[in-house]
Amino acid sequence: QHNKTTMSATDISPGIILAEDEVLSNLPKYTPLLESIDTILLLGGGVPLSPTEPPVYVQRRCDVVAELMTRAATKATVVCLSAGTAHLPQYITPHNGLPLWESTASAAYLLRHPQYPVSEEGRVYAETTSYDTISNAFFSRTTMTDVAGWKKVLVVTNEFHIERSKAIFDWIFHAPSSDDDALAPYEMYYLSCNNVGLSPEAVSSRKAHEARGEANVQNNLSTQYPTLKDVWEFLTTQHDFYTAKKLVSTATGEDRVKADNLLKISYGQSSTTLSKRSMEWKDGRLVLALDMYVIVALVVLVLGLYFSFWKNARSSHHKINNPIKNTQ
């Protein structure tokens, strides 16, 4: 349910949130809108599972976009967003040691989709600068839509993320470039995909996080930074991932911000990604990045080996001290 802004298919006006099930089950009603869309902004959502697999809930976003692009025969481009997340380390590709952008995994998933592959050249783009939803909006506008002239935009994400995404994209895409400019002439539409691949507890934790963020955007950020230049100043002077001083503090370990485990899961953390990152070879040395579960497992293993060695040594000592008894 999206009772805040969702409307029926007979009254599709800019700014509404459409639901996946409604659109896919009544596609002919929505085809005229989809055919008129210039670009689809496909939001990233966490650490990929592999170079061709975004997190499961992001795969759902990709599935819906691929199906719409094929069944509705839209000529829209699709821009896969996000370099990474501010909440977890990057996925490092083993063959070259370079970070894997979230947008790369989403683009690969779209281009190689098993049912609806998006094969036409020039339709899939990857944005590789943003690390959260605010920078998703800022960099997709400043490096993609403003330059390409795409004015009718469909933003796609999961239900747990859609309301804050709408607040952010409405703020940034309607912001004038400066105080002297008129509002940006964008038509914004939103598509909410089903929440899949996350436990109810993880979704609940993420929704609480999203609600706080949405309130901050509506009550503070959008009024304090009303122009695109203001948003740029916010990013470069206040944002953890774009302010030089904060980046240095994070890199040196002086500023360590920890998210709770359920929130991390909603950004792509899993036992698979943890195990992949527990050991890495960098600059000619072995680097350990151990999760608590890995540490516990190693402790249990070491204790097991110790007691096994102690038991065997004691047995051997007993045999040496009792040679007659052991040969009878």
Image: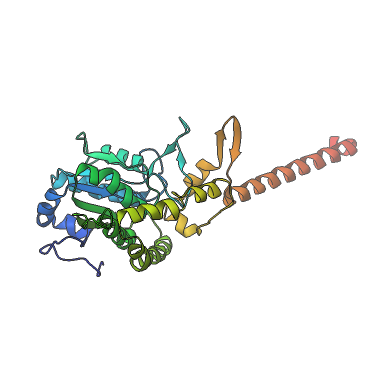
Residue 9 x %, y %: 13, 62
Residue 2 x %, y %: 25, 66
Q: Who's the residue at 37% across and 44% down the image?
A: 129
Q: Is residue 202 visible?
A: yes
In the depicted structure, whether residue 164 falls above or below residue 76: below
Q: Who's the residue at 47% across and 53% down the image?
A: 240
Q: Tally the numbered discs.
A: 0
- Point out the image quarter for the N terminus: bottom left
Residue closest to the eye, 66 or 154: 154
**Horizontal side of residue 307 vs 234, given as left or right:** right
**Horizontal side of residue 42 vs 267, given as left or right:** left
Residue 32 x %, y %: 9, 52
Q: Is residue 322 visible?
A: no
In which quadrant of the rendered view does residue 143 lie? top left
Residue 128 x %, y %: 36, 41
Q: Who's the residue at 56% across and 33% down the image?
A: 281
**Horizontal side of residue 12 vs 204, given as left or right:** left
Residue closest to the eye, 295 or 234: 234
